[in-house]
């Protein structure tokens, strides 16, 4: 369409302006749509988290309003639906379980909760953890890096080869056909960095860490030290991968010869250590390598 009195170039600009404006509006709306879509995804994720929290709160509220349950331990599975359970107060019962429960997890030794009236297995409970072992697992190793340790470069290299490499790259050992070492012994005079090296390994690896002071687990009562050692290794087995750091291990290796009672305690304790170390049920056997 000809516009009198306006040059041809100016006429082209006037005709192109509505198109450019429409294109800019389209781009702006597209960016707004992307921004709104991103916000919508974030709100959906928040809604999922809030829904999970709401369901958890509802379940906790129902558990608080319900009647208490009996804690028991599964002894044996008779059939697909029947189990022999020993209650904490002593008697044993042949009971059934809820249909919603995964029966493959009801193995001998599993702690379960029983209904007060029907004695039906309502849910399975986690393994009971000794308070001392629980405190060991919540020991904060601190944020220690290898670069902060000076003068022990050779020891750090060997320690990473023995402890860190089998956890981070186990396929290297499988490819070569070598059984990876599962432990090492740090020895030396006091103040040479043994505990600091262990803290550095624990802070660099994303795994569970048990800090054990050996002198604190030696008990005067016969059988208590052996029980604590079993609890410690059972916790490590249930929370793999796990690093057990036993500080001041010479405290459990010395035999007190002042009285026969102390000798019996130490002998019973060392038997438990050897029994756990030689157990075929452990996925990681103890294989010491000096550093």
Image (tube, helix red, strand yellow):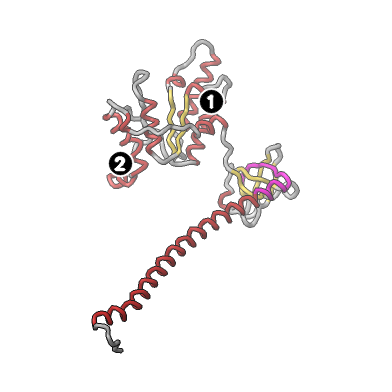
**x 41%, y 41%: residue:** 206
Residue 285 belongs to the span the image colors magenta: no
Left or right of 152: which side holds 67? Answer: right
Q: Which residue is mark 2?
A: 178
Q: Nearer the viewer, residue 73 or 41?
A: 41
Q: Residue furthest front?
A: 5
Q: Nearer the viewer, residue 274 or 212?
A: 212
Quadrant in the picture for residue 112: top right
**Magenta-highlighted residues:** 60-76
| Secondary element at tag 1 | helix
First along the sequence among labels 2 and 1? 2
Classify the position of the C terminus by image quarter: top left
| Secondary element at tag 2 | loop
Instruction: Tell me residue 27's x, y (percent).
Output: 37, 70
Q: Which residue is mark 1?
A: 225
Left or right of 24: which side holds 85? Answer: right
Local packing at callout 1 (Cα closer than 10 Å; few below 14, some 14-19, many 20+) is: many
Residue 69 belongs to the span the image colors magenta: yes
Q: Nearer the viewer, residue 153 or 3?
A: 3
Instruction: Classify 266 as above or below 99.
Output: above
Instruction: Classify 63 as above or below 16.
Output: above
**x 28%, y 78%: residue:** 13
**x 65%, y 54%: residue:** 98
Instruction: Tell me residue 107's x, y (percent).
Output: 57, 47
Q: Residue furthest bottom?
A: 1
**x 35%, y 78%: residue:** 18
What is the spatial separation of the Cα atoms under label 2 and label 1, in whole angstroms?
A: 34 Å
Left or right of 127: which side holds 281? Answer: left
Mark identifier at residue 270: none
């Amino acid at each position: 369409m000809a516009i009198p009195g306006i040059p041809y170039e100016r006429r082209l600009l006037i005709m192109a302006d509505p198109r450019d404006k429409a294109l800019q509006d389209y781009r702006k709306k597209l960016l707004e749509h992307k921004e709104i879509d991103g916000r919508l995804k974030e709100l959906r994720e928040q809604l999922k988290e809030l829904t999970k929290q709401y369901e958890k709160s509802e379940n906790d509220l129902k558990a608080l309003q319900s009647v208490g349950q009996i804690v028991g331990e599964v002894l044996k599975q008779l059939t697909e639906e029947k189990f022999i359970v020993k209650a904490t107060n002593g008697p044993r019962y042949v009971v059934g379980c809820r249909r919603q429960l995964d029966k493959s997890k009801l193995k001998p030794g599993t702690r379960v909760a029983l209904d007060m009236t029907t004695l039906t297995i309502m849910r399975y409970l986690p393994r009971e953890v000794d308070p001392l072992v629980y405190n060991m697992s919540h020991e904060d190793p601190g944020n220690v890096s290898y670069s902060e340790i000076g003068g022990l470069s050779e020891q750090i290299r060997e320690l990473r080869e023995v402890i860190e490499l089998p956890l981070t790259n186990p396929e290297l050992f499988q490819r070569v056909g070598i059984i990876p070492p599962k432990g090492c012994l740090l020895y030396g005079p006091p103040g040479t960095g043994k505990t600091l090296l262990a803290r550095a390994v624990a802070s660099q690896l994303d795994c569970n860490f048990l800090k054990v002071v050996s002198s604190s687990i030696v008990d005067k009562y016969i059988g208590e030290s052996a029980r604590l050692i079993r609890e410690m290794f059972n916790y490590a087995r249930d929370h793999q991968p796990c690093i057990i750091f036993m500080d001041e291990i010479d405290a459990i290796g010395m035999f007190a010869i002042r009285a026969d009672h102390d000798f019996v305690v130490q002998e019973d304790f060392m038997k438990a250590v050897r029994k756990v170390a030689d157990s075929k049920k452990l996925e990681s056997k103890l294989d010491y390598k000096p550093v």
